[in-house]
């Protein structure tokens, strides 16, 4: 398995694209909402064995919560902590329930040509890091506003995040964190239907 030196410092995920970033055990990644309403679909893979990945199913099960909050760990499919939420200056609204957008979703929304999507962004980001997996896990949809009502139905609302809000995640093992600036520009899940760049900082 390829090993990549830690990329300490700031970086940027271009609007509607994806990026994989190596975060060593003990380091943190701060994912920053530069413009306020951009959703960031986020995955994590064990850097030594990407068949171990961050699992929203196991995360919900361990935390007994449908989102993640400070003090929670995002768990792997092998029920081990991967990312620990250490700080969150946003309203704390993140989705673990809905699927990453993919090519078929945009076809069903009426797109006739290729539409960028979070699923392809994840695989492109991994490929740039020299990795590949034959599946697409559910993502932690950071800043995505999907409330669950008393009758157990869902709504899709505009993010409540303000510019500059961030969530800080500490790596509990060596991981690649993959972020996608969600390209959704047909619904209002990203606010004003304009995908925007996402900033991040990897720090000790
Ligand atoms: Zn998306």
Image (cartoon, helix red, strand yellow):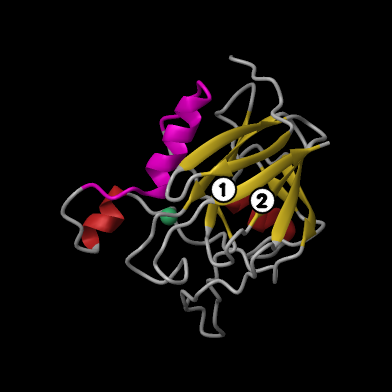
**Ligand 1: quadrant of the figure:** bottom left
Position of 169 relative to 9 (above/below)? below
Q: Residue at x 54, y 65 (%)?
A: 144
Element assignment for label 2: strand
Q: In the rendered view of the protein, which quadrant contains the N terminus?
A: top right
**Where's residue 46, x and y in %?**
64, 30
**Where's residue 76, x and y in %?**
65, 40
Q: Residue at x 42, y 41 (%)?
A: 121
Q: Residue at x 19, y 62 (%)?
A: 110
Label whose residue precedes the other's in the sequence (1 or 2): 2
Label 1 packing within 10 angstroms: few (<14), some (14-19), many (20+): many
Q: Residue at x 64, y 26 (%)?
A: 47
Whether tag 1 and tag 2 are in contact, CB under 8 A, the answer is yes
Q: Which residue is mark 1?
A: 42
Q: What is the C-alpha distance between the residues marked 1 and 2?
A: 10 Å
Q: Which residue is mark 2?
A: 31
- Ligand 1 contact, mark 1 (Cβ < 8 Å): no
Q: Is residue 44 magenta?
A: no
Describe residue 66's horizontal placement relative to residue 132 as left or right. Answer: right
Describe residue 184's horizontal placement relative to residue 80 as left or right. Answer: left
Q: Residue furthest toward the left?
A: 112
How many numbered marks have been drawn onto this rendered protein structure? 2
Task: Tell me where the magenta segment starts and ends, as one range.
Answer: 114-134
């Amino acid at each position: 398995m390829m090993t990549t030196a830690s990329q300490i410092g700031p970086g940027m995920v271009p609007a509607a694209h994806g990026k994989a970033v190596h975060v060593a055990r003990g380091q943190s990644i701060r994912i920053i909402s530069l413009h306020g309403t951009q959703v960031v679909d986020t995955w994590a893979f064990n850097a030594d064995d990407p068949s171990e990945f961050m699992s929203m199913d196991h995360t919900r099960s361990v935390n007994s919560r449908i989102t993640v909050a400070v003090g929670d760990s995002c768990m792997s499919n092998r029920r081990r902590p991967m990312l620990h939420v250490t700080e969150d200056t946003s309203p704390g609204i993140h989705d673990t329930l809905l699927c990453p957008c993919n090519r078929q979703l945009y076809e069903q929304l009426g797109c006739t040509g290729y539409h960028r999507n979070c699923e392809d962004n994840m695989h492109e980001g991994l490929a740039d890091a020299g990795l590949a997996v034959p599946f697409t896990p559910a993502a932690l949809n950071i800043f995505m506003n999907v409330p669950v009502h008393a009758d157990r139905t869902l709504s899709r609302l505009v993010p409540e995040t303000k510019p500059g809000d961030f969530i800080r995640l500490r790596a509990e093992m060596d991981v690649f964190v993959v972020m996608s600036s969600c390209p959704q520009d047909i619904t209002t899940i990203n606010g004003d239907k304009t995908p925007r760049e996402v900033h991040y900082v990897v720090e000790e």
